[in-house]
Image (spheres, rainbow, N blue to C red):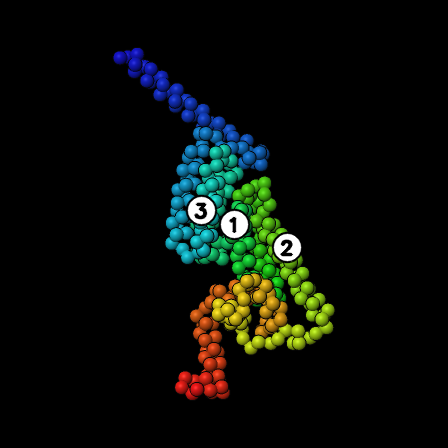
């Protein structure tokens, strides 16, 4: 009985000494980090400390998840934040710098007083949340803004505005989600620069076309007294009723974008015109219906087409 008790006491003492040794090693690593923090931050967390670190980060991440679910930010934005942080926290070899970065992002988002899509995006820009998903989210958002804008010059202004927004947000840390990749700011600057280049080429091509044909803008493009939204729907009606063939939809809308203009849009984007013909708002349909009824009334009054007149 005494032998068993002594063995248990010895085993308990050994575990205690082992834990104390691990604690001292952690303290030593932290002390060494003061002399070369760059090297220390790139080392993976020890098996002894990684468990507690992950527990603390998961607890904070769950609190952030609750805040996101109760907010009205874009669903896709909330999902990519949570999945990106979860992926970072669960890395097999979690480095000290990665744990500190995850903790920093969670804290900054958690302390936002105005938890809106705009403010959350600003934090991710400034604290370099350079996940592929966040880049794709930003690129898609930019594309949606452009395709909803018929005027090529207005599209150019949108790109300048997006650049200006990022330039007005100074970086707050040198750390980033993927340390080896470019910062999200540089990735988006490159993306916007390329977009501006393509758009400038399209504008120049339109200008060259007018110059080559030696026609004034008013002569080159027939004025239609409809906004782009109603013009797109009007073309769609012709196609749905078989008046205009459906074989090459893109070519059809490109033709009308090239040869027609509206009072507020001298250069129409073919992609925007086509999109607005399918993404139809009630006000647009209601207004165009009024024009069509007016046409029918004119036929009835001037061409004897009312029922019973023939």
User: Which residue in the structure is indicated by mark 1?
Assistant: 134
Q: What element carries label 1?
A: helix
Q: Which of marks 2 and 1 is in front?
A: 2
Q: Residue 269 vs residue 5: left or right?
A: right
The Cα atoms of the two marked residues, 2 and 1, are separated by 18 Å
C-beta proximity under 8 Å, tags 2 and 1: no
Q: Residue at the location (36% across, 17% down)?
A: 10
Circle on res. 194: 2
Q: Residue at the location (45% across, 24% down)?
A: 21
Mark 1: give few (<14), some (14-19) or many (20+) Cα within 10 Å. Answer: many
Q: Give the answer, above or below, for where 46 lies relative to 189.
A: above
Tell me where residue 83 appears, x and y as whole percent: 45, 45
Q: Give the answer, above or below, for where 113 lies relative to 19.
A: below
> Which of the two labelled residues, at mark 2 and mark 3, occupies the earlier sequence position?
3
| The furthest residue to the front | 310
Q: Give the answer, above or below, for where 18 lies relative to 263.
A: above
C-beta proximity under 8 Å, tags 2 and 3: no
């Amino acid at each position: 009985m005494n032998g068993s008790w002594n063995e248990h006491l010895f085993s308990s003492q050994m575990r205690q000494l082992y834990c104390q040794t691990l604690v001292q090693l952690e303290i030593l690593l932290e002390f060494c980090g003061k002399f070369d923090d760059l090297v220390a931050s790139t080392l993976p967390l020890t098996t002894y400390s990684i468990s507690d670190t992950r527990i603390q980060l998961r607890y904070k991440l769950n609190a952030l998840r609750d805040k996101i679910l109760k907010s009205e930010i874009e669903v896709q934005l909330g999902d990519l934040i949570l999945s990106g942080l979860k992926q970072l926290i669960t890395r097999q070899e979690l480095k000290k710098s990665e744990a500190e970065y995850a903790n920093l992002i969670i804290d900054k988002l958690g302390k936002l007083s105005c938890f809106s899509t705009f403010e959350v995006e600003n934090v991710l820009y400034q604290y370099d949340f350079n996940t592929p998903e966040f880049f794709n989210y930003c690129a898609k958002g930019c594309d949606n803004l452009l395709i909803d804008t018929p005027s090529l010059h207005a599209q150019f202004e949108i790109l300048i505005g997006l650049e200006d927004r990022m330039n007005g947000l100074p970086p707050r840390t040198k750390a980033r989600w993927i340390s080896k990749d470019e910062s999200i700011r540089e990735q988006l600057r490159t993306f916007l620069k390329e977009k501006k280049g393509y758009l400038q080429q399209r504008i120049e091509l339109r200008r060259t076309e007018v110059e080559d044909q030696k026609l004034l803008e008013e002569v080159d493009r027939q004025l239609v007294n409809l906004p782009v939204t109603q013009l797109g729907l009007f073309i769609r009606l012709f196609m749905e009723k078989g008046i205009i063939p459906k074989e090459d939809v893109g070519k059809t809308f490109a033709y009308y974008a090239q040869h027609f203009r509206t009072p507020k849009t001298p250069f129409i984007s073919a992609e925007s015109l086509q999109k607005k013909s399918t993404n139809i708002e009630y006000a647009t349909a209601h207004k165009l219906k009024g024009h069509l009824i007016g046409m029918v009334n004119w036929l009835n009054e001037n061409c004897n087409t009312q029922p019973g007149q023939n």
